[in-house]
Image: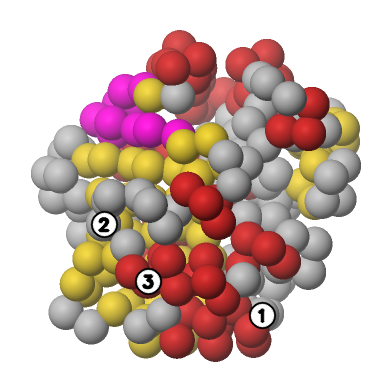
Amino acid sequence: MPQDNQPQLEWRDGGVPVSRRFDDPYFSLNGGLAETRYVFLAGNDLPARLRPGFHVAELGFGTGLNLLALAAVAAVPVRFTSFEGFPMSVDEMARAHQAFPELAPLAQQLRDGWPRRRMQVGLVEAEVIIGDVAAQLPVWDGLADAWFLDGFSPAKNPEMWAGPIMAAVGAHTASGGSFATYTAAGHVRRALTDAGFDVSRQPGFAGKRHMSVGRRAP
């Protein structure tokens, strides 16, 4: 894969991958799994809303932690599609996954399927679409019931949070679908409102003031 698609990692605090490209960690230094459960699962009212065929989509696959957290709570077969511009190698993922030993069997399933970008992780059938999200998302033929918006910080990766991409998120959301994200940046909330979501702020994780959630009208 071309060098400019590599994630350009450094490792901090004994195993937290940090993107040198965006100067941002892949998961919270205060507890990545706890943050995922708080922001992306609870923020989308999961697992309560899960039903067979429920489709979760994501911007920013990273280490796959959000997929693993979803698989850990999914009691019915669901689908998962993630968009990632700078994919890690299997070895880099394995190193990152050491931080979450309770997810080890699911993490192994993820890594087994990673070369094909398709994997069965628990009851979750997952696909990761590699490339520029601005090109890939508009032509995606899926509709998500819930979105995990987990790109790097809007201040450091503004392209991921641009209005046209948020509009594409809205266009690829089913009636009554939802999103959750750790950011409460005003321009992101406005773009998601313009994309058709009823957007609100909630208390953030681990001392962060706010995060954002939203629903499309049913």
Residue 141 disc label: none
| Residue under numbered circle 2 | 143
Residue 98 occupies quadrant: top right
Q: Position of residue 164 (x, y in %)?
A: 53, 71
Real-space CA distance between mark 3 and mark 1, rounded to the nearest whole angstrom: 17 Å
Quarter of the image that includes the N terminus: top right
Q: Disc 1 vs disc 2: which is toward the camera?
A: 2
Q: Circle 2: is it few (<14), some (14-19), or many (20+) Cα within 10 Å? A: many
Is residue 105 visible in the rendered structure shown here? no
Q: Secondary structure at mark 1?
A: loop
Residue at which label 3 appears? 170
| Overall secondary structure of the magenta section | strand
Disc 2 to disc 3, C-alpha distance:
9 Å
Three-letter amino acid code at the position of disc 1:
Ala
Mark closer to the observer (3, 1): 3
For image coordinates 47% across by 48% down, the residue present is 136
- Which tag, 3 or 1, sits closer to the chain's start? 3
The reply to whether the C-beta atoms of the residues labelled 3 and 1 are less than 8 Å apart is no
- Residue kind at label 3, given as amino acid type: Gly
Residue type of the residue flagged with mark 2: Leu
Residue under the point 61% across and 68% down: 161
- Classify residue 107 as left or right of residue 24: left
For image coordinates 22% across by 40% down, the residue present is 78
Comes first in the chain, label 2 or label 3: 2
Q: Nearer the viewer, residue 164 or 105?
A: 164
Q: Nearer the viewer, residue 31 or 112?
A: 112
Q: Which residue is mark 1?
A: 185
**Residue 107's x, y, as percent?**
49, 22
